[in-house]
Image: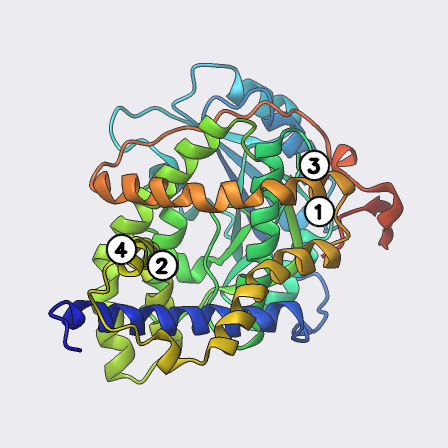
Amino acid sequence: MHFNYDVVMIPLQLIIVFFTIYYFVVSWFGLFGKMKETKQFPEKSTFALIVCAHNEQQVIAKLVENLKQLNYSDKLYDIFVVADNCVDKTAEAARNAGAIVYERFSETGKGKGFAMEWMFHRLFGLERQYDAVCVFDADNLVHPDFLKIMNNHLCSGERLIQGYMDSKNPEDTWVSGMFSISFWIVNHIWHLAKYNIGLSCVLGGTGMCIDTKLLKQYGWGATCLTEDMEFTMKALMENIPTTWAHDAVIYDEKPLTFKAAWNQRKRWAQGHFDVANRYIPKMLWKGITEHNIVVLDGMINLVQPYFLLVSTFFVFCTYIYNLVPFYTNVLYEVLPIQVWQIIGVGQYIFPVAVLWKIRASFKSWLYLLVYPIFIYSWIPIVMLGFLHRNEHEWCHTLHTRSIGFDDVIIPEDVVNVGPKQVAFRKK
């Protein structure tokens, strides 16, 4: 039977088939693929550790103290804190903890991306020059071996590297628990998977390491609401992929309330659409004309929120279809129903496999029961992000968990890391 809507519905179904298979296949390389081994190098690279902080007096000192204790020569790195438009005692707390503090006050250009741009210019004007910069958020805690691992990646020729983003408060509330689970899953079935098969990861805004020569050559220039994704795509257009350091761990504070998580993710969605609108056309052109699969994969990553909107629209169409068939269903003609069943089961296996792999706590397993709430809440958030994609007002996330590195360790997972005995979550 011929349907007038097939001109839209058949291509839409083919798009859904492509993305479904794409995500499903890539995910397996993170769970079961062998992680790339990085060669060990002696301590060589010099680092500027940069923290952009806006009214973070409650947490900044713990991070600075943590960074001073890294298992890396003190002579090879310095700690810089940008007190960005602060009206509290962030600058004082950072100085007292031992950081080199720069205070920035600006009525225009508010946000982390602008603060980083401002700091990079000052960093390049210093007498001492560094091989790389590492960027952290004020609420972070950093594993002692972070710089050792980043040094190995830099000496191996990598120029843009993202570390493993763990959680320092996965059991505070059900919201922080779900947020933590989402990060663990993405770390494995997305970042690690892509790194294993030679594709580009995406910078996460914190725990990232950037070759200074790269910054000087191309400039930062990433000042939108998702500056990390913007710079990822900017570098990818220059054929510089973002790599993944699975053992370079940072612990991030996750939002405690659903409202805070909603606002943060809405900002991410707005920024994602902003970057997508500017980079999808030129990445598609570059990928096709140069036969560059890595760039095309980066473009696909930018299409994700559009795919969520399209797939949500299709779900509503299927409900109407059950009452009044108005298009030709080709899903089962393209892929047998057995394949769809395997994929359907797989979407529940992946989260379970990741939690098993990292030896998650009992409480995290309980939070997994309400994890679908977190997943499906992305639908209205992405819709709002699309509607407000041209707005660029920065929404600051309040951080209150002033805890030290010892407070995020798991006692039964103690490992030897040089001169210190510390514990950390298995990955």
In this view, which residue lies farthest toward the left?
A: 4
Distance of mark 3 from mark 1, alpha carbons?
8 Å
Give the residue displayed 36% in from the left and 59% down from the top. Answer: 304
The mark that comes first in sequence, 3 or 1, is 3
Residue 403 position in % (x across, y down): 70, 27
Nearer the camera: disc 3 or disc 2: 2
Nearer the camera: disc 3 or disc 1: 1
Nearer the camera: disc 3 or disc 4: 4
Residue that carries the numbered disc 1 in the rendered image: 143
Q: Residues within 10 Å of mark 1 (few under 14, many from 20)?
A: many
The three-letter amino acid code for the residue at tag 2 is: Gln
Q: Nearer the viewer, residue 38 or 119?
A: 38
Distance of mark 2 from mark 4, alpha carbons?
25 Å
Q: Residues within 10 Å of mark 2 (few under 14, many from 20)?
A: some
In this view, which residue lies farthest toward the front?
A: 323
Q: Nearer the viewer, residue 368 or 341?
A: 341
Q: Of helix, strand and loop, which one carries label 4?
A: helix
Proximity of marks 1 and 4: CB atoms separated by less than 8 Å: no
Give the residue displayed 20% in from the left and 41% down from the top. Answer: 390
Residue that carries the numbered disc 2 in the rendered image: 304
The three-letter amino acid code for the residue at tag 1 is: His
The three-letter amino acid code for the residue at tag 3 is: Asn
Distance of mark 1 from mark 4, alpha carbons?
52 Å
Which image quadrant for residue 123?
A: top left
